[in-house]
Amino acid sequence: QEQLVESGGGLVQVGGSLRLSCAASGRTFGTVAMGWFRQAPGKERDFVAGINWSGKNRYYADSVKGRFTISRNNTKNTVTVYLQMNNLEPEDTAVYYCAAQDTEMEYTDRWRHWGQGTQVTVSS
């Protein structure tokens, strides 16, 4: 069964850092693009960062450029995607979701698989 499991969320003060992890299993996620989205209370789910299957190409929302870094580790049997978040702001408070696409070796911007989410709260 395909599964994306996030971890690493929590409470942090303004200017602090967190690293989110997403463990992907159940299919060959190593050949598809993956990414992170977030949803704040009362708002829509927004794109945060994406990374192509090889890790060579990365994409960011304007609001997080220069502060967040997405990376991935593809092994034979597992894929882990990370989101390093630095200089956090109260506006970064949200539930963060890991996501994966379906098309192999392409970055299509069509997200088909989702994790359950992890809460990030930035306090001022």
Image (spheres, helix red, strand yellow):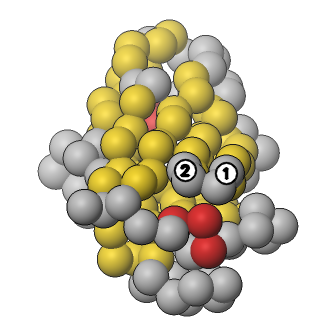
Tell me the quarter of the picture where residue 104 sits. Answer: bottom right
Tell me the quarter of the picture where residue 95 sits. Answer: top left
Tell me which residue sits at (67%, 42%) in the image.
68
Q: Which mark is residue 45?
A: none
Looking at the picture, tell me which residue is in the foreground, 96 or 94.
Answer: 96
Going by the numbered disc 1, the residue's amino acid type is Thr
Tell me the quarter of the picture where residue 108 sits. Answer: bottom right
Q: Is residue 102 left or right of residue 65?
A: left
Element at label 2 = loop
Q: Which mark is residue 78?
A: 2
Report if the CB atoms under discs 2 and 1 are less than 8 Å apart. Answer: yes
Q: Is residue 30 left or right of residue 95?
A: right
Q: Quadrant of the C terminus?
A: top left
Q: Residues within 10 Å of mark 2 (few under 14, many from 20)?
A: some
Where residue 5 appears, as percent x and y from the top left, is: 35, 43
Please give the residue where the numbered disc 1 appears in the rendered image.
75
Q: Is residue 91 left or right of residue 89?
A: left
Q: Residues within 10 Å of mark 1 (few under 14, many from 20)?
A: few
Going by the numbered disc 2, the residue's amino acid type is Thr
Tell me which residue sits at (51%, 88%) in the image.
103
Where residue 92 appears, as percent x and y from the top left, is: 46, 37
Where residue 6 appears, as percent x and y from the top left, is: 38, 39
Q: Is residue 40 visible?
A: no
Q: Quadrant of the N terminus?
A: bottom left
Distance from Cα at disc 2 to Cα at disc 1: 5 Å
Tell me which residue sits at (83%, 67%) in the image.
56
Q: Is residue 109 visible?
A: yes
Where residue 53 appears, as percent x and y from the top left, is: 67, 71
